[in-house]
Image (cartoon, rainbow, N blue to C red):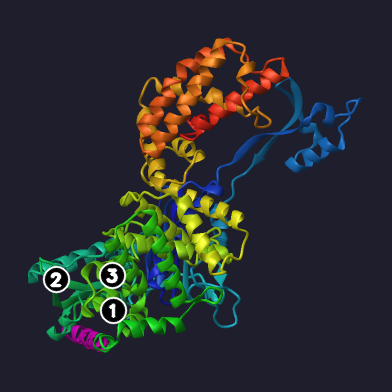
Amino acid sequence: MSKRDFLIEIGVEELPARFVTDSMNQLKDKVTAWLQEQRLDFDGIQAYSTPRRLAVLVEGLLEKQPDVAEEAKGPARKIAQDGQGNWTKAAQGFARGQGVSTDDLFFKELKGVEYVYANTFTPGQETRKLLPQVEGLITSLHFPKNMRWNQFDLRFARPIQWLIALYGQELIPFSITDVSTSKKTFGHRFLGAVFQLDEPKDYVRRLAEQFVIVNPSERKQLIRQQVEALAKSNEWTVPIEESLLEEVTNLVEYPTALFGSFDEQFLTIPKEVLITSMREHQRYFPVQQKDGTLLPFFITVRNGNDQHLENVAKGNEKVLRARLSDAAFFYAEDQKLDITAALSKLENIVYHEELGSIGDKVRRVRDMSIELSQLLMVNEAQKTEINRVADICKFDLVTQMVYEFPELQGRMGEVYASLKGEPEAVTTAIKEHYMPRFAGDASPSSLTGTIVSISDKMDTIITCFSIGLIPTGSQDPYALRRQAAGIVQMLVDHRVDISLDQLIETGITLIEKRQLLKRDRVEMETDLKEFFALRIKNTLQERGTRYDVIDAVQTGKTSHVLTVLRKADFLMKELENTEFKQVVEALSRITNISKKAESIHQINEVLFEKEEEKELFEQYKVLKESVEKSLADKRVDRAYEALVGIVPTINRYFDNIMVMSDDESIKRNRLAQMKALASVIQSFANFQAIVFA
């Protein structure tokens, strides 16, 4: 069957860099899914993008759908025919639905029942007649933000300027807003020209001739090579941040790297300020010495060729000079601000209309930090340190530098606090109380920073839950999931000996004292425990823990994060033990039959009829104490060994005892014994969740 290549190109006004990659992938995924749905085979599919275009090239697309011959199953014979053998309305309706007459119907037996069947034939349609449907795929693309233009109702990232839908040499006709498909596309805005594309296979080559490198991976690699070449020729070190490289890739169609310089006097400004100004505001790559010392140079990427680069460099230097002059002014002015005066200004910044000011939040963080310090039994010197950090951790929010560069909050607090004579432990913790800021970020290096960070994040989570700001679906405007994940990470990284239940209970009690608890306390505690349980689950998944092991360890008590992780790690190793299956089966027999206990009853030893009951009960009492102590001591291995030790007794019990006795009182007593033992077993894990091949 013959094939042709198919090209879609959507030409737009410049897309925001952060939209480009996702939009390209969306278009590819939608086209791929649609082709599969239409039963249209193809050899391959490539996606392309620049700031001005999104494109998909389908290679070797069949010119026609395959014909489909099927055997359609209808109602049972007793429904399809009446007692006289006449076709019923059900059979007639089935025939009409399949496009055949009742004369074409026949019967076949399936699992002892006769059903009516019909042979159907659907001829394949020509691909060229189906392809106009891709218009709907284009208009269904979604973006972080949309816009409308002119009088059109379409909402799209940016106005559409041109469209190509080319199947071989044949134009596929459709229109979106007032733009119709054509064979015309556009080269680089300044270096290229408008030209006609006759074949999809020429797309990449013809655009390259017009100074457009349409393959984003190729553009990215070219930028990397050019930056590295400049660094090598000047004996610089240029750390290439991947997110910045991705953004620059999506800002240009024809990249050319160049470098510029700035006045050395600006190097007196903190390094992070200079780097932030260059990276975040100008999309420049900072230049360093091998030891990490910042140099007064930068590398930028031009959307064009290598002509007149000295003029381009001068223009970028002029823009950066203005930026850095502002930063130098802010830095000088901020140093005049006293920390106490800065803290007083926090009272005038609204944190949330229902939760008060930033000053109110700072006081809550301090209260929480004090409580955690007591729970963790830190020494008096550390308590003093923690209190000071909690008091002043947000003071830099009122500085001009943080107002201009919000991403520097914490870091500027560290710098300014150091200049005001605060101890290094305090200044470091001010910066670190925001950590971890994102997935993969490091935890605070000190216990002081960890306690204040946990307190800050717990306050945010608990107060938001209190007023109903709970993440739903993909919506999480206050980044509560990220902050909860950060708390779990810190508990693990610093092996903090405190449970999530304690954190939740302490946090709720503190906001209740401040009259900020707007919901039922028990309901809120339940919601918070479930919320954190999901974060623990994510942590276990990231560590490569099997899904059934995750289910097993999360069914028991999940409050102490370190213990849960230790259990998961231990069980993952036990999966390789040949005796593990027998242990799981024995323990699962207990937990399974315990579910039949309709209510909780006291175990009555007088009702024991056999020695196996007495033996199991005596071992249960020892087991309960041993497992509780081992888990309290974080000795997961000992707790498991205790459970393994009772397995022979469990097996003897079930070999000789019928739990569901005809005597109701004995049955109830035996179920009570099962219930009690199951409680001990499940305090370790729900072994029934573990799956064996």
Q: Is residue 376 above or below residue 123?
A: below
Q: Residues within 10 Å of mark 3 (few under 14, many from 20)?
A: some
Task: Estimate the spatial distance between the alpha carbons at disc 1 and disc 3, rounded to whole Å.
Answer: 29 Å
Is there a contact, CB below 8 Å, between mark 1 and mark 3? no
- Dot 1 or dot 2: first in sequence order is 1
Q: Amino acid at mark 3?
A: Glu
Q: Is residue 551 above or below residue 40?
A: above
Task: Estimate the spatial distance between the alpha carbons at disc 1 and disc 2, rounded to whole Å.
Answer: 17 Å
Q: Nearer the viewer, residue 34 or 61?
A: 34
- Dot 1 or dot 3: first in sequence order is 3
Residue mark closest to the camera, 2 vs 3: 2
Residue 685's disc number: none
**Disc 1 on helix, strand or loop?**
helix
Residue mark closest to the camera, 1 vs 3: 1
- Dot 2 or dot 3: first in sequence order is 3
Residue 284 placement: quadrant: bottom left
Task: Estimate the spatial distance between the alpha carbons at disc 2 and disc 3, rounded to whole Å.
Answer: 36 Å
At x 30%, y 85%, the residue is 338
Residue 315 in the magenta stretch? The answer is yes
Residue picked out by circle 1: 282
- How far across and down, in percent of the image, does residue 325 sit? 23, 89
**Disc 3 on helix, strand or loop?**
helix
Q: Which residues are magenta?
A: 310-329
The secondary structure that dominates the magenta segment is: helix
Q: Amino acid at mark 2?
A: Gln
Residue picked out by circle 2: 288
